[in-house]
Image (spheres, helix red, strand yellow):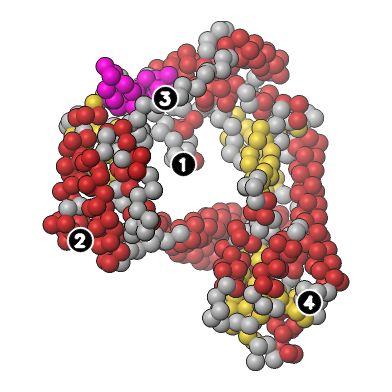
Amino acid sequence: MPRFAFAGRCSTEDLQDPETSRNWQLTRARALIEPAGGEIVAEYFDSGHSRALPWKRRPQAAALLTALRDPHRGFDAVVIGEPQRTFYGNQFGNTFPLFTHFNVPLWVPEIGGPIDPDNEAHDLVMSVFGGMSKGERNRIKIRVRTAMGSQAKIEGRFLGGRPPYGYRLTDAGPHPNPAKAADGKRLHRLEPDPDTAWVVVRIFTEYLEGKGYYAIAEGLTRDGIPCPSAYDRDRNRHREGHAWCKGAVRAILVNPRYTGHEVWSKQRKDEVLLDIDDVTLGHRTKMAWNTPEQWIWSAQPVHQPLISPTTFAHTQAKRHARSTQTHLERKPRPTTRGYALRGLIRCAICQRKMQGTFNNGKPHYRCRCRCRYNAEYAKNAALDHPLTVYVREEAILPELDKWIAKTFAPGQLTATLQAMRQAQSAESPTTTAAAAARRTMAECDRRIVQYRAALDAGTDPKLATEWINQTQSEKASARQDLLTATAIQPEILTEDQIKHMVSGLGSMTDRLLTTASEHKRPLYESFGLALTLDMQKRVVIVESQPAHACTYGKCPRGDLNPHAR
């Protein structure tokens, strides 16, 4: 009985049900091979990956290509349920030669069996399906963008996203699409937020009166007005929220929505080659800003304006005049000086990398976080950082070299092994993230059951539907976090591997003691050093996480870089 591996793909869960898509593709594949006595023994099904991604960048498709190289792969042929879901553009021409090379037949329903590599008609049919797949994706993209553009321009519809600072979302009635309306989806529009709308007016007024970005930010912070990230912490947890910054003031001054018009297409997604030397790797999506001439404005104001169009036009004219007068391009400042700890030492207060600098002919490291912070953010007491944190390199290196020599010495091998094993046994960040995602999904399931029970008990159907939709959205987000957390698992080294690593690093310790300071950085990188300077306690905390790929084993041809000693 021939053994087959099944290959398939579906898009994100927002567009289609992965389980349903897998089932119907699997049904088509089985209908093709079962009359020939075939049996599916392995599956390679990608869920949530665009068809535009080449096979090398889809996890399951890449695993299938790897399995082709294994003579003990466990299957004799590969069957595809839907070629338009699996191949895109010229992907068939880039991957089928591998199937031919490893003598693995590729079965496709549209061919009625295995593809004959010498049959021009088969090659033409598969190329047509790849072109149809690409055309279908392009047509969908054009239809969606055109529809959203007309909705913004003609209807003035709010098309999603977070409301600008100064506004909040309010209900605008049921969704015009009957199917979405039946699911409880509703339209929204912007309305002024009484707590922050007056701040936007103040910012525009002060800017036109002659104040700059920093002066406005300083005045708002001094008056105790929360900055946007502090006002809405739930959606800005990645920001500190200590004070107003120049970037927040600028973002408000350039936002045309404060005129009462809905504005769309301020940004676009460009597809650029991932590697210009290997076009088979496909493209990556990159966000880019459109020019103001490309923005799509609603024909009429659709929400209450905070400023007039004339005020906004005067603001942009003033910004443009300032930018043309003060913009100067700085010349790069390359250096030939060597810093042994460049990129390896951080400040314990702000966790920023410290900057190398020469003073009196000797290398030093400094952290000027407060200078940079105060150049961007208004003054506040949330960050207690000295003006400059300064330390000499020669005050660290001797003690650091002694610690390395002691830790990786042959007599300390057992203790070092135990320490590395204990560090690996600790819970990794990916494991923690996966556990948190599972807890969130379980909590969402529990809440959905409660909401449905409340619906059966007579709760307002519209309100219960909103609860269920929101919870399902949270569950989908948690599911994606779980997939991300479990996609990359940290490699757990065996005791023998760690022993070889420590032995190899021990031999490098001798080189470290005889190498000049300016040439020690590659050796420190091999030890995986991470230093944290705590000037308040006047100590340096050193952590070592050596990468076994750099230290495991020795080159049989000896040292290929003797000049680096």
Real-space Cα separation, disc 1 to disc 3, in angstroms: 43 Å
**3D distance between C-alphas at marks 2 and 3:** 41 Å
Magenta residue check for 363: yes
- Mark 3 to mark 4: distance in Å? 60 Å
Q: Residues within 10 Å of mark 4 (few under 14, many from 20)?
A: some
| Marks 4 and 2, the one that precedes in the sequence | 4
Q: Quadrant of residue 538?
A: top left
Q: Amino acid at mark 4?
A: Asp
Q: Which mark is residue 234?
A: 1
Residue 209: x and y in percent read 57, 7
Q: Looking at the image, do the residues carrying marks 1 and 4 touch, with CB atoms under 8 Å apart?
A: no
Quarter of the image with the C terminus is top left
Question: Image height check: is 307 above or below 50?
Answer: above
Sequence-first disc among 1 and 4: 4
Q: Which residue is mark 2?
A: 418
Q: Is residue 256 left or right of residue 143?
A: left
Please state if 543 lies on the left or on the right of 558 as rendered: left
Magenta region: which residues? 356-376
Please give the name of the residue rendered at 63% of the width and 26% of the height, measured from the top-left corner: 255
Q: Nearer the viewer, residue 523 or 107?
A: 523
N-terminal-most mark, 2 or 3: 3
- CB under 8 Å between discs 2 and 3: no
Quadrant of the snapshot with the N terminus: bottom right
Q: Quadrant of residue 392?
A: top left
At horizontal 81% and vertical 64% (from top left) the residue drawn is: 127
Residue 45 magenta-highlighted: no
Residue 450 screen position, x and y as percent: 49, 64
Q: Does residue 310 show up? A: yes
Residue 327: x percent and y percent? 58, 14
Q: Which residue is mark 4?
A: 116
- The dot on residue 335 is 3
